[in-house]
Amino acid sequence: MDKFSKYVGMDVHQETIAVAVAQAGGEVRYMGEFVNTPEVVKKLVTQLKRDGARLSFCYEAGPGGYVLYRQLQGLKQDCQVVAPSLIPRKPGERVKTDRRDSLTLARLHRAGELTAVWIPGEAQEALRDLTRAREDMKHLQRQAKQRLLSFLSRHGHRYTGKSRWTQAHWRWLEGVTFAHPVQQIVLHEYIDTIRACNQHVASLEQEIERAVQDSPVWPVMEALMALRGISLIAAVTVVAELGDLRRFDDAPQLMAYLGLVPSEHSSGKRERRGGITKTGNSHVRRVLIEAAWTYRHPARKSAILQRRAERTTAQIQEVAWSAQKRLCQRFRHLTARGKLPVQVCTAITRELTGFIWAIGQQARFSTT
C-alpha cells in the first residue's frame, strides 16, 4: 500500500506554478497554472486534501530557493526538492513546456525515481549566503584589478616590482600620470573601485568571524582547520555548503558529490576515463582545490597550524597530521612521475576530501 495517495509535481517559476497530480496507482492529470503566492499555495493544498488524500509534493531545485518547501512543511505536507540534473530524460524528447514538466515530475515522483537534494536549515542557509556573498565580492575584486591592469598596459604603464597589490605597488599606482585629464580620472575611478571591493571583502570576512563563534557548527569548523590549507573561510564554506558530513556514508560518496571522481564512458571491453565530473557543489570544490596546493611543500607543523590543532581532540590531530604526511609525499611522488601540476592538485584534492570526511565523522555537530 502506498504511503501517499496523491503525488504532486510542480514546475515552479517566480510568478507561476504549473501543477500536475498523479494518483497512487491511477491516472496522471494536469491541474493547471497557479499564481505563486503563499495564499494560492495554501488554497491548493486545501483543495487537494478535500477527499482526505495524503499528499507528497515535489519540485526542481532552482533560483526560487526553499521558500515553497518551507511553506509546505509549515502546512504539515511532505515535500521534496529534487536535483534537476538527475531527473530521467528521454533522449528523443525535444518538446519542453511547463505542463509537460509538471506531469513528468508527478509521474516520476510516484515511481520513486527522483533524487532529493539536501535542504539546509534557515540558520545554516544564512551562513551559506554570507560565504557566497564574500565569494561574489572576491570575484568583483579580481575583475576590478584585471581591468585596471589592462588599462595601464594599454598605455604602456607596467609595474616592474616583485609583487602586485603590495604597499610598494599602491605607491607606484599613485604616481602614475597620463597626458589627458580624463584618463587620470579613469585611473582613479578604477583604483577607488578596487579599494571599495577590498572594504566589502574585509567587512564580510569580519561578519563571518562573528557569525561562526556562536554557531552550533563551530566545533566542526575548528576541527577542519587542523588540516593544512583549511583556513577559517574554507572551513566555513565546507560546513555551510555540505552541512553534517555524517550524512555521507563513506568518503567516495563525498568525493562524487563534489565532482572529484573521474568521468567514464566505457562500453564492452573498452574502458575510457576522462577528467573529473565537476558535478555537485562547485563552491566547496574550489576552496578544496586551493587548499590542495599547499601540500606541494614538505610536511611540517607551523606555529599557526599547531595552535589550531591544539584546540581539537587527539584523534583529530592524528588524522590531520597523517593527512599532511600522506598528501605532501603523494604530491612529490606524482610530480616526480611527470604528472601535470593541475592533475596532481586534483588527485590531492580528492584524497584531502577523504580526510575531511574522516574528521567530519568525529567532530561534534549540533543543529540546535
Image: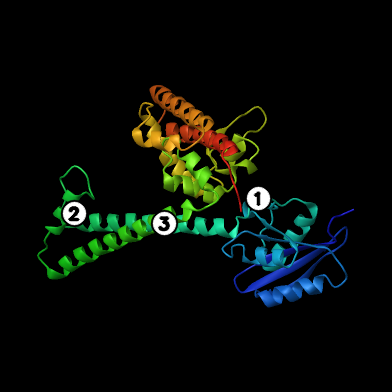
| Depth order, front residue of 17/202 | 202
Amino acid type, mark 2: Trp
- Does the rendering let one see residue 263? no
- Read off the residue under disc 3: 134
**How far separated are the C-alphas under marks 3 and 1?**
29 Å
Residue 265 vertical position relative to residue 238 in the rendered view, above or below = above
Q: Quadrant of residue 110?
A: bottom right
Q: Which mark is residue 9?
A: none
Q: Which numbered dot is residue 86?
A: 1
| Residue at left offset 37%, top offset 27% | 300
Q: At which x and y percent is residue 31?
A: 77, 72
Q: Is residue 100 left or right of residue 235?
A: right
Badge 2 or badge 1: first in the primary sequence: 1
Q: Nearer the viewer, mark 2 or mark 1?
A: 2
Report x, y in % for residue 1.
Answer: 90, 53
Q: Residue at x 28, y 60 (%)?
A: 194
Q: Name the kind of residue labelled 1 in the image.
A: Leu
Residue matched to label 2: 170
